[in-house]
Amino acid sequence: MEINLILISGIHTEGDENMELLKRLTEEVGAPGFEHRIRDILRKEFEASGADVLTDRLGSIFGKKQGKGGNVKVMLAGHMDEVSFMISEITSEGYLRFVPLGGWWDQVLLAQRVTIITDKKSYTGVIGSKPPHILRPEERNTVYPMREMFIDVGAKDATQVKSWGIKVGDPIMPICPFEILPDHDTILAKALDNRIGCWLAVELLKALQNEQHPNTVFSGATVQEEVGLRGAKTAPYVIDPDVAIALDVGVAEDGPGGNPNKAKLGEGVLITFLDSSMVPNTAFRNFVIQTAEEHNIPYQVDVMLGGGTDGGEFHLHKQGVPTIVIGVASRYIHSHTSMISKKDLENTLKLLVAIVKKLDNDTYESFLN
């Protein structure tokens, strides 16, 4: 959103074999404009599912699954990029200044570990911070602005930094390993915004391999959502969809001091009724709700004006495309670490499969009246 018994890396995930793909997606890096590693994973998964692969010239990618008849073109898309940074300056002392790629709150940055991605190698650094022992009284209650922060990669000077192949323009990525917590439901990882959308896109095509559906499905992911919904502008020209579903996270507000009437982890699929970029097609929205209720799939409603998704561009394509945002609630998005419920993710996949199996031409026509 803008401003899916194994022992893996020592983390016990008994009963969660289908989360291996999500682990790979979240632990891989994909800054806006640098999504190629995520795209490579998706391409292999789409091909393995038997789907035809389509791309646009910015780098968005989709797998195509032809249904019976297939008159209605249904586009479902997450986005590959994650909030990150870019090197803007290398100081003479060997420190890195940086700028954000996507929306960050400065307060979550200090003392966090990051990875600098160069053409040939990755380097670990830390966003520098003063120890409390030397803080002046006026500094103790001050949040440092990002423009004054720096990254320390352990170099002695700029010459050494450049000798390692680090240069201005290189992306900088948060570090957070994938983990399923002891409740066997809560997933902790970086980039759940929006690798859950990528996971859903892949798993939907897998689920449809042996299923009949009365439409043509284009399931995939866009680029550069976090810096202005850019891939969402170009991708629809490849598909020319009749309807679109943006696959993304919403904000969970179930922590201390949160709003008890807002989205919570584990309470069901998140269906967005309003955000800053789109009011969904009402008939399409009602169809999604009806489908969830028919299949006893728990869902939550999200109304939020503080962010938007690729749906903001999808619904404006050409003469207009009935569009809705479907996904899961997530804690701590746009930081190094976020959380979702595995149960919510699996229910979202069930709902998407049910929607696709019902969405025939008559249903589509009802969205236009």
Image: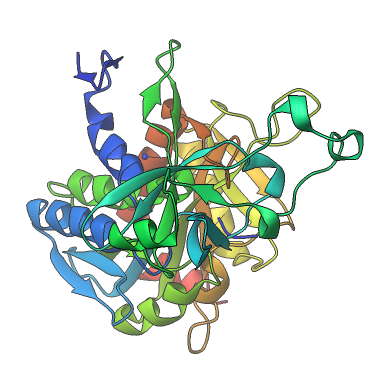
Q: Is residue 209 left or right of residue 347?
A: left
Residue 160, placed above or below residue 218: above
Q: Is residue 74 left or right of residue 143?
A: left
The residue sitting at 43% across, 69% down in the picture is 168
Res 359 visible: no
Residue at left offset 72%, top offset 36%:
262
Camera-side residue of 17 and 181: 181
Location of the N terminus (image quadrant)? bottom right
Q: How many tags in the picture?
A: 0
Residue 123 point in image, percent of width and height:
33, 47
* Camera-nearest residue between 27 and 130: 130
How far across and how far down the image is residue 148, in percent?
Answer: 69, 56
Q: Quadrant of the C terminus?
A: bottom right
Residue drawn at x 24%, y 38% is 21
Q: Quadrant of residue 14?
A: top left
Q: Is residue 15 visible?
A: yes
Q: Which residue is depicted at the point 41% across and 48% down? A: 155
Q: Position of residue 24 (x, y in %)?
A: 26, 40
